[in-house]
Amino acid sequence: MIDFYILYQNIYKEGSYLLIQETKKNLKIMKHNFMGHKCNFKLQYQYIQLQNNLRVCMFEYLHGKNIVYRDLKPENILIGADGYLKLTDFGFAKYCDSRTYTLCGTPEYLAPEILLNKGHGKPVDWWCLGILIYEMIAGIDPFNDEDPMSIYQKILKGKVKFPRNFDKNAKSLVKHLLVADLTKRYGNLKGGVNDIKTHRWFGDMDWDALLQKKMPAIYKPPIKGKNDTSNYGSYPDSTELPKAIKSSDDPFINW
C-alpha cells in the first residue's frame, strides 16, 4: 500500500483557488526525526534503509502512472502513526510520458539535466533519491553550499565525496543514482526499478510484505491520541485578508 497525502476537493473563489486536503494530526515531518536521535546506530541505519525502501515503492508507483514527482526532500515526507511514510506536496509533480522542461525543485536536489534545460523526466526522481540517501547517512547533502549558484556548479561537476565511515553498499547505490549520464543511472536502465530494488544495500527485502504493511515499523512517532498535535509547531491564525484584485486579473478564473 502506497500512501500519499489526499486531496479531497478543489474550490474556486474569486481571486483564490482552494485545495481541501486531509487532516493528519498524528503525522510527523521526517526532517525533525532525521537520524532517529533516540535509537542506537544499528537501529538508525535499519530505519534509513526501510524509509528508502518505501520511497522506491512510491516512485515505482508514480512512474507507472507516468507521473514525475520532482521535489523529494525531508520536508515533503511525513511519518504516520503506524511508522510508514506518506508523501506530500505534489506542487511540482507532473504527468510526463517523455520529457518536460520546467526548471523547478529544491536547489540541493536538482538533477543536472534540469539545470542544463535539455529536457528531463522520471530519472530526476532517482537522482533525488540518491541525494536523500546520502543526506540521511552523512547528515548533509553531497553538494552543500550556502550559495545556490555554487550548488549548481557542484552538481554539474558531479564529484561526490563520501565520509570515511559511509557504508560501502550504500555508497555503491548512491554512486549508481548520482550519475549525470542517463544511460548509466539506476532506475533508467533496461532493468528499470529492479536494478535499485535488487541492489545489495537493500539486502533480502520482502517488497510485497512492505507494500502490504506487514513489516513492523522500526520507529513510530510518539502519539497520545488521534488529536495529538505535539509533532507540529504552533502558528497563530492569520487575520490578514488577501489583496483584492480585478476579475480580469484573476489568475484562477479559467482553472
Image: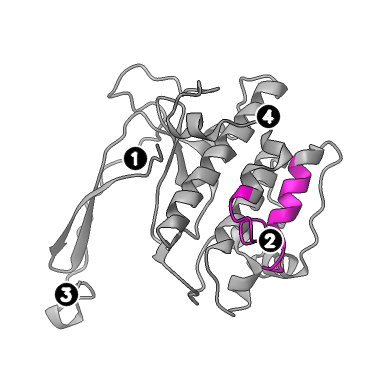
* Mark in front: 4 vs 2: 2
Numbered disc 2: secondary structure: loop
Badge 2: residue crowd in 10 Å (few <14, some 14–19, many ≥20)? many
Residue kind at label 4, given as amino acid type: Tyr
Q: Earlier in the sequence, mark 3 or mark 4?
A: 4
Residue 240 drawn in magenta: no
Residue kind at label 1, given as amino acid type: Tyr
Residue kind at label 3, given as amino acid type: Ile
**Can residue 132 be seen here?**
no
- C-alpha gap between disc 2 and disc 3: 42 Å
Residue 235: which disc? 1
- C-alpha gap between disc 4 and disc 2: 24 Å
Residue 185: which disc? 2
* Quadrant showing the C terminus: bottom left
Q: Earlier in the sequence, mark 4 or mark 2?
A: 4
- In the image, is 184 to the left or to the right of 237? right
Task: Place residue 237 in its image quadrant.
Answer: top left
Percent x, y for residue 88?
40, 47
* Mark in front: 1 vs 3: 3
Q: Earlier in the sequence, mark 1 or mark 4?
A: 4
Residue at (41% x, 25% y) in the render: 82
Which residue of the protein is positioned furthest toward the top in this rendering? 224
Of residues 82 and 17, the one nearer the viewer is 82
Q: Earlier in the sequence, mark 1 or mark 2?
A: 2
Numbered disc 4: secondary structure: helix
* Mark in front: 1 vs 2: 2
Residue kind at label 2, given as amino acid type: Arg
Residue at (43% x, 69% y) in the render: 96
Residue 45: which disc? 4
- Span shown in magenta: 170-194
Q: Which residue is mark 3?
A: 253
Percent x, y for residue 30?
51, 37
